[in-house]
Image: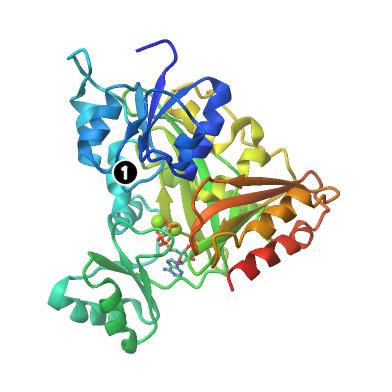
Amino acid sequence: MGKTPVIGLLGGGQLGRMLCEAGGPLGYDIAILDEDGCPAKQINVNDKHVTGSFKDAAKVKELAARCDVLTVEIEHVNTEVLEEIATKGVRTASGELRRVPVHPSWRTLRLVQDKFEQKEHFKAQGIPIASQMALSGGEALADSLREAYEKLAFPFMVKARKGSYDGRGNFKVRGPEDFEPAIEALGKLPLYAEKWVPFVMELAVMVVRTEDGEGNCTGIFPYPAVETVHEDDVCKTVFMPPRKVDAAVRAKAQKVAEQVVKSLWGRGVFAVEMFLLRDGSITVNEVAPRPHNSGHLHIEAVPYMSQYKAQLHAILDIMPKSMKLIPRASQAIMLNILGGAAADSHDKLVKLTETQYIEGTDAYLHLYGKVSKPGRKIGHITFTTPSPDVDLEKTIAPFVNEVDLMRQ
Ligand code: ATP
Ligand code: MG
Ligand code: MG
């Protein structure tokens, strides 16, 4: 390999695009496996990209053969081929068999792909999760749902164990009348049931994990806790700091997230999604072992080490031995831009961000280069302020209003 390491990336959506935005000034070559014209390839031209699907084992090997390290922007990848590449090796152009490190580890990816197994793992580590039980498939599912009711009471969540995002594999069961619709909606998939969590707030903490060559954790660096607000199971806004949450709870969220990420494998950034309950306790919802929507605001709020720069530095094993991830902004709010009914529904919001100057508040627009479709994440805006006294939520209300209008 050449002097500058080549990073292979499975998936070239918006997370990959922002990884490339961070990697450009640092001089790293990022080779992307995804379709031509995907958001990440649009802004990163080099001769190392591979065209195809990150689910295709042959393409993953083709990518690995030209890279020094592999990483992902999505956890729904083929972990068998990643295990083979990391442990046995991949045949390079010159015919040698060469091992290519995979970060986060394929073990982590395999574990988290099954949300039920992921949380069984956390439970075994003493990490608090909502009660859950595996559901039987086929004919036995209806009986299994009745058992879930006996164990978990109504309401409970039926969730697809694998492949879900933005709540697409989730179904809330409020009473027996929801059994049939739940079976109708998700019955063909491997499922589990999860106790409904009457949370007062959702929190998330991004954590950077470093490791030595033997797989031992050498560093855990949490970002500040943020509050995530979901609408129809899709993240709408992220608040840093969380609204009306005292420092002790924020610190507890960081501690829980550290414990979660310590229990996993590999280098990189990990997002830990959590529920905050009325009594101040925290349960873990799930982990995404990669850059995450809840960490977008760090691009501007923790500019010396955004989650994307942290991902690059961690996987290249050049992270400082000690580091504090302290925001340079007093407050930040991230607002997602989802596609509206028409292809240009978001134009007004974009215009507003471009033309509106707000004293004491900075607005940063990120568009992902994606075709707009209703409900699709096509961009975000981060608002920051150096002042602890500005009512940032109030200041940005016109922007949130535009987002709400787009949904109608
Ligand atoms: P993503 O990976 O995009 O975050 P997902 O499809 O894996 O989403 P979850 O994170 O399981 O879905 O759930 C999506 C949202 O649904 C959560 O952020 C939360 O708002 C709500 N939710 C999930 N599980 C529960 C639960 N047990 N009780 C109450 N609300 C829940
Ligand atoms: Mg998920
Ligand atoms: Mg989630």
All told, the count of numbered labels is 1
Which residue occupies the foreground of this view, 253 or 332? Answer: 332
- For residue 357, above or below residue 269: below
Q: Report the coloring of the rendering.
A: rainbow
At horizontal 21% and vertical 27% (from top left) the residue drawn is 87
Which residue occupies the foreground of this view, 78 or 142? Answer: 78
Q: Specify the quadrant that holds the N terminus.
A: top left
Q: Which type of secondary structure does the marked residue at label 1 adopt? A: helix
Q: What percent of the width, then of the height, locates residue 182?
A: 30, 78
Among all residues in the image, which is located at the extreme front? 343
- For residue 357, above or below residue 157: above
Asked if residue 371 lies left or right of residue 84, the reply is right
At horizontal 49% and vertical 64% (from top left) the residue drawn is 374
Answer with the quadrant where ligand 1 appears in the image.
bottom left
Q: Specify the quadrant that holds the C terminus.
A: bottom right
Q: What percent of the width, then of the height, locates residue 284?
A: 44, 57
Asked if residue 331 lies left or right of residue 182, the reply is right
At horizontal 51% and vertical 56% (from top left) the residue drawn is 372
Which residue occupies the foreground of this view, 393 or 263? Answer: 393
Determine which residue is flagged by label 1.
109
Res 25 visible: yes
Q: Quadrant of residue 80?
A: top left
Which residue occupies the foreground of this view, 142 or 234? Answer: 234
Q: What percent of the width, then of the height, locates residue 176?
A: 31, 88
Among all residues in the image, which is located at the extreme right? 359
Residue type highlighted by circle 1: Leu
Around disc 1, counting alpha carbons within 10 Å, would you say few (fewer than 14), some (14 to 19), or many (20 or more)? many
Q: What percent of the width, then of the height, locates residue 32?
A: 38, 33
